[in-house]
Amino acid sequence: MKLFQQLLVAPAALGLMAPVAATAAELNINDISEYSSPAEVQGINQFSDVYPTDWAYQALINLAERHGCVASAPNGSMTRYEAAALLNKCLGNVAQVNEEERRLLNEFGPELAVIKGRLDGLEARVGEFEAGVFSTTTKLSGSTTFVVGGVDDGDQAENDAVTFSYKTDIYLDSSFSGEDLLRTRIRTGNFTASQPFSSDGSIENGATLEVANTNANALNVDRAYYQFPLRENFTATVGALVRQDDMLGVWPSAYPSDAILDVLTYAGASATYSLSSGAGAGVTYAKDQWSASALFVSEEANSSANATNAGAGGGLLTAQGSDDVTFQTAWSDDRFTLAAAYTIADNGNTTGAADVNNYTSWGLSGVYNVDEDFDSEWLPTTVSYGMGWKSPDKKDNPDTSSNSVEDETTWTLGLIWNDAFVDGNNLGYAIGTADGDTGTAGTQGHKDDNGYDDPLAWEVFYQISVSDNITVTPAIFSVARDGDEFSDVTGALVKTTFSF
């Protein structure tokens, strides 16, 4: 800091005193605040106390003309605090002063000292205020996404209208050691559970978007967990509201989660990577290219209501509560990522009734970074592929048969071209199963009842980077159904994402 910046006080800082009423009153600076604002030091004609016959008056005129720090020449007397404020304004950013300016500093030193002392107190108070409002250990970030678009599903033409919806995510990330993470995510939005962009996963209600939610403009916390190093190569995660993928060592797909259709964002294994959410804990071991994770999620752990009632209970890891346990092992380097995962989901089923959500499942997913081997603008930058196998639990579902829940398979292929056509823009294409394929139609507890004959979905999007914080993504998509009772769903949208 320059020498005289330490002595002089920037008038702009004094301007901050007016909004902070309590601080201003405590410092008792009302007498001088009107003289200290840089917006008010336009001319010296309003000053009083230093008279035109005084040497300091003429010296201040010379100072103002030499540095151009006021808009008009003085006309009349001024107070000593007004003179000090003018002196501060003209010399606040000056590295060296001449003899006349040094004499002015000595003359008005007491007034400058008073201003500086009071502002030091104000800065301390402001520092306390800022620390109370927001912790220095916490970073706030987030995004808001606008979606304009619609679908055409033929048999429900009355819903073929263009809609405009939004979603906002706010992340509060805190670290207390530099190696740990306390994450809280707040989400809101106004997507509906029905047409055209269903957020309930029901194909009759449209095409579920990855961005969709049904928060009805309410602010809801949907993440609250703490992640920390346990020991060398081990990381632990525990939370009252944590999602399955928050505790995995690797997410085995480069196809972006911020894509279009939700069903194409589960690494090809939607049962294994179910993204269940609730209270949970997990541990990951990672060394070099290899990692292994083990975790559980209890979806009703926040309530003990009906904890002893079969099929209607809650609590942490109870027989009646819905619990998911996942194990994953993965290998990842610059060229390839390959992961195998196994999930056990019980859905709190203790009744023996057929339950499509009471199952075991496998997932095998991977990524090939094509640009590590080929330098071609036509080849995709990454290729992501995954498959999943889901089997209902025969022990817990004794009445499982060909007329009940059945084994299912899923798969997804996703391609990304980075810097497509224009640097910073990305092109994406994905295709895969819109729902688990059983090989038969009309099975109980399965969406084949809702019109799936060949459950296939695909999408194409082009992400345009407007700036570092704004992207605009036009997209088209389709979900194939039986074409008889339920027509295919086709749609188009424009998604605009603002990151902050």
Image: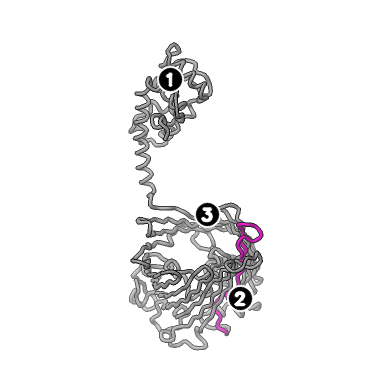
Is 86 located above or below residue 259 in the figure? above
In the image, 482 versus 478, the foreground residue is 478
Name the residue tied to disc 1.
99
Type of amino acid under label 3: Ser
Is any part of residue 37 visible from this angle? Answer: no
* Mark 1: few/some/many CA within 10 Å (<14, 14-19, 20+): few
Q: Secondary structure at mark 1?
A: helix
Q: Secondary structure at mark 3?
A: strand
Is any part of residue 384 visible from this angle? Answer: yes
Residue at image x 47%, y 26%? 90
Residue at image x 46%, y 78%? 357
Q: Position of residue 67 (x, y in %)?
A: 51, 24
Q: CA distance from mark 1 to mark 2?
A: 85 Å
Q: Disc 3 or 1, which lies upstream in sequence?
A: 1
| Left or right for 249, reference 72 | left
* Viewer-side label of 2, 3: 3
Name the residue tied to disc 3.
499
Q: Position of residue 423 (x, y in %)?
A: 62, 57
* Viewer-side label of 1, 2: 1
Q: Is residue 434 magenta?
A: yes
| Left or right for 315, reference 450 | left
Q: Which mark is residue 456?
A: 2
Residue at image x 38%, y 81%? 350
Q: CA distance from mark 3 to mark 1?
A: 53 Å
Q: From which residue to which does the magenta span run?
A: 417-439
Q: Disc 1 or 2, which lies upstream in sequence?
A: 1
In the image, 486 versus 492, the foreground residue is 492
Q: CA distance from mark 2 to mark 3?
A: 32 Å
Q: Is residue 445 magenta?
A: no
* Viewer-side label of 3, 1: 1
Q: Disc 2 or 3, which lies upstream in sequence?
A: 2
